[in-house]
Amino acid sequence: MTKDKTPLKSIDIKDYLKSVKALTDRLLNRYLPAEDMFPSTLHKAMRYSVLAGGKRIRPILAYSSYQYCDGNVDGEDLPIHFAMAALEMVHTYSLIHDDLPCMDDDDLRRGMPTCHKKFGEAAAVLAGDALHDVAFNLLASTGSNKVVVELAKAIGTFGMIGGQMADVEAEGKNITREDIINIHCRKTGALLSSSVRIGAMLAEADKKTMEKLSTYGEKVGLAFQIIDDILDIEGDQNLLGKNVGSDSENQKATYPKAVGIEVAKSDAHTLINEAVSVFDEFDDNILIHLAQYIAQRNK
């Protein structure tokens, strides 16, 4: 099995995240339609939402997995670059639709007015649809049918969109731990896990490595959303860039609601440890450091 050749002890995880985030932002700026192209309002809405900031965790996971599997990172417009931009566009389109009045009705996203507040509901719906289209055009440019199928499954009715439907139907109801795990693994976890898998696919990882990274992605994906639920209760609104407490106000299904805040924290910690444990005892790599960073995030 191959892995990232850079000695991890020489890497500051925050510097690494900053570097890959900057790369992602450059790619997004390059691959998004220009604002002055017709229809300009739609393109402005797309760029506004995508370039408003964000953690870029999905492209970072894809890139880190790709590096771990010894993928080539030298050059411009590589298949991994197309995939990184596509993953962030899909994520942003889901946020635009999630913020709409018919869904979560949020006014703030990444510290700025949400897309529908800035451009109107019709433009927001169409901006989300258009980002979905651009994303799959980029994925097709990778030359890999496998990654196209992978992302389609991750965001379809058995993944993100199905999880969003389950989330809507669970509002105001008593939910079990099993219920919320099902929602989170689909709504959030599927795209995060798929990001890890897509990076490995583009690096042509072997079956054993794919299985290992799939488990890693599933554990990290669920932990990420549990931590997100916790931050909605205990987080700093200025750091999060969105309203704190909106989940409770909207009677959303959350992990702390199902099991309590302390059990939620414990389960997230366990999931991160399980994600890290898929690697060999002496296998120090960026994915381990990334999982540990996610466990400690405050936004």
Image (cartoon, rainbow, N blue to C red):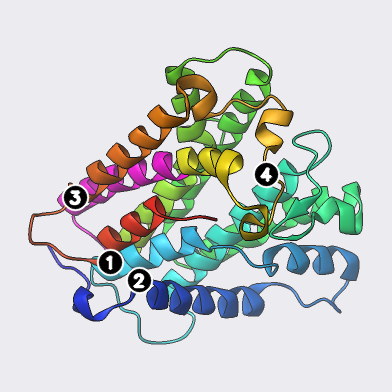
Q: CA distance from mark 3 to mark 2?
A: 28 Å
Instruction: Indicate which disc residue 286 carries.
Output: 1
- Pointer 4 residue: 244
Please report whichever mark, 3 or 1, sits nearer to the chain's N-terminal start. 3
Kindly identify the amino acid type of the residue bearing the numbered disc 2: Ile
Can you tell which of label 4 and label 3 is closer to the viewer? 4
Residue at the outermost top position: 174
Q: Earlier in the sequence, mark 1 or mark 2?
A: 2
Residue matched to label 3: 207
Q: Which residues are magenta?
A: 204-224
**Residue at screen point 26% across, 59% down:** 288
Say what amino acid the circle numbered 4 marks: Val
Q: CA distance from mark 1 to mark 2?
A: 8 Å
Could you say which quadrant of the image residue 104 lies in?
top right
Disc 1 secondary structure class: helix
Mark 1 and mark 2 residues within 8 Å of each other at the beta carbon:
yes
Left or right of 288 on screen, residue 30: right
Report if residue 243 lies within the magenta region.
no
Q: Which mark is residue 232?
A: none
- Which quadrant is the N terminus positioned in? bottom left
Q: Measured from the top left, where is residue 163 in percent x and y?
A: 56, 31
Which mark is in front, 1 or 4? 4
Gap between marks 1 and 4, in whole Å? Answer: 31 Å
Specify whether residue 122 is in view.
yes
Residue at x 70% of width, y 51% of height: 242
Q: SS at mark 2?
A: helix
Q: Position of residue 135 (x, y in %)?
A: 60, 60
